[in-house]
Amino acid sequence: MDEPSMPMPSEGSTPPSPLSPPGPPTPPIPLAELLASRDLGLRRIAGPAEAELLWVHTSEMADPYPYLLGGELLLSAGVLLTDPDTYVGRLVEAGAAALGFGVRPVHETVPGALIEACDRQGLPLLEVPPETPFTAIARTVWRLMAEARHRELRRVTRAQQALATAAARPDPVPAVLHQLAAQLGGRAVLLTARGEEVHAAGRDPAEEIDAAGRPLAPEAAGALTRLARVVARERPGSPASATDTHGDTHLSAYALGGAEGLVLALATRRRESGDHTVAGIAVVLLSLLAAPHQGADAAGRSAALVRMLLGADPAEVAPLLGATGPWTVVHARRTDGTPADALTAGALAASLGTALVDAGHGGGEAVRLLLPGAVPEDEAARLLPGAEAERSLPEAEGEPARRQPGMAPQDEAVRPLADRVTPQPGWTLGASAPTPVTALDAADALAARALAHARATRAPLAVDTPVRGLAALVPPEQAAAHARTLLAPLTAPLADTLRCWLSLHGSWDRTAVALGVHRNTVRQRIGRCGELLDADLDDMDVRAELWFALRQG
């Protein structure tokens, strides 16, 4: 019965923290759906009836707290259960969603003390009959999750098609708002930065009444207007989106990229999985529809492309793109591993304040974006309406960007970059340091390297910054010559592996994730590096010298 449904950490490994779990790529499963699977014979005998399951985990440890991420249905036969009250308290503290207790062969029945503890501390307790293996429960949960994910994808696909059809109508903006309100079952409003209503569609939740005839949310409209002012891009530092709850009404607001000060505001009675994606599609469409002045900007990009194809120097065409300062290259991948389509990539570009985005061509390619540097103040609104410094979305606050070893903290490094490139919900980002337009090819490689580092460390953002500190005291020519001599025995793949391995503090597993190879391959390559360099890679002095040399490339 004690069969793990998820990989168990090995002895001696660092247990994962339950404080900041990475969310699964599927919607949570209501506990009631699992209980409705009659072939499992599960029965809730204590605790609340409602819970949402994110994972299934099996553990017979006396204290599984260090190995829980939160949201689990924990399955146990109570092999080491001695203090039910403390055991349940630790599960609740770890954020477990429910406890499934298997009867026999250890316990003939669920201990009464455990039932009382679950009732007292509000943890759902399920009785698992002897004939039901834990693996069958896990399989059912994964099946329910797959079905939920399929329903969500179908819903988003239908919504995308409906919104695109609406955008092709003679009155596209009202049509898109009407369709969005219908898809979300609420109200969609296009507001100016001052809170003035431009277009609206759908039923206002403030007009809905309960069984007694009283308004359900009489002040929802005012709260929605105030929320819209938070994201209106009238000043630097405005977030790209914001959410709030007013009574039973869910409120959200999104700044439109390319539309000066316009905000899409939504009010719904419920919030379902996929709503944020549907709203994001509408944001992209409305940004394009409500920003006719972007035609001049598109003409400039077309002219720059033609001149580049005809052999012009990048420095000559950069002004056509509206930038006079250094550029930043950003590589991005969806956190859940799904490929990004053009609309999703466009929404990310709008959030970062740029129109220069390459969504890739499938096959696992990363989305690539170019963020222009300084824009003349009188041209900023026309060329890049979203060019003001953007803060991270409310959902991403408190989740700081990671920096690779040797990088300076963002506040001490490139302040404008830290303001512009911020973590984006659902994305993993890697950014280069601001660089001249003539060195964008090198910046592209640095952004790819930063993205690999972010994925390996599970950080939402990693930024590659120029060499600074003590390393900056060595003249660049001398540093480069020393690096070429020291690293001459290594091939390019070996040098890349060594750089990645050192940046991740010698972690075999994280390096394997970053490079997309097996951990044994990493071990073989690092061993080969040590042989070719005739150096002890466990020596800190050797590592420091190699890291200095690798940072020159």
Image (cartoon, grey):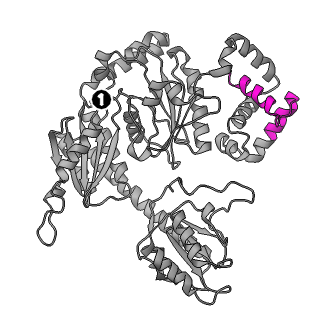
Part of the protein shown in magenta = 524-553
For the image, the number of numbered tags is 1
The question of residue 538 being in magenta is answered with yes
Quadrant hosting residue 168: top left
Along the horizontal axis of the image, is 99 left or right of 47? right
Query: Height in image: 389 above or below 211?
Result: above
Task: For label 1, count other residues whose C-alpha is less than 10 Å away and answer few (under 14), some (14-19) or many (20+).
Answer: few
> Is residue 553 visible to us here?
no
Residue 185 is left or right of residue 394, and the answer is left
Q: Is residue 61 above or below residue 444?
A: below
Question: Residue 537's x, y, as percent?
Answer: 82, 35
Q: Residue at x 68, y 77 (%)?
A: 80
Nearer to me, 118 or 461: 118
Query: Residue 218 versus residue 511: which sits nearer the camera?
Result: 218
Horizontal relation, residue 50 to residue 473: left or right: left
Residue name at image x 42 percent, y 18 percent: 305
Q: Is residue 35 left or right of residue 296?
A: right
Q: Position of residue 25 (x, y in %)?
A: 49, 55
User: Does 529 lie within the magenta span?
Assistant: yes
Q: Residue at 45% across / 63% down in the picture? A: 28
Label 1 SS:
loop
Q: Position of residue 55 (x, y in %)?
A: 54, 64
In terms of image quadrants, where is residue 192?
A: top left
Q: In terms of depth relative to the viewer, which is nearer, 532 or 98?
A: 98
- For residue 551, what is the image quadrant? top right
Query: In the rendered image, which quarter contains the N terminus?
Result: bottom right
Q: Main secondary structure of the magenta part?
A: helix
Q: Give the answer, above or below, for where 142 lies relative to 77.
A: above
- Quadrant in which the C terminus is drawn: top right
| Residue positioned most to the bottom | 108
- Report the residue marked by disc 1: 235
Residue 78 x, y percent position in the rendering: 64, 79
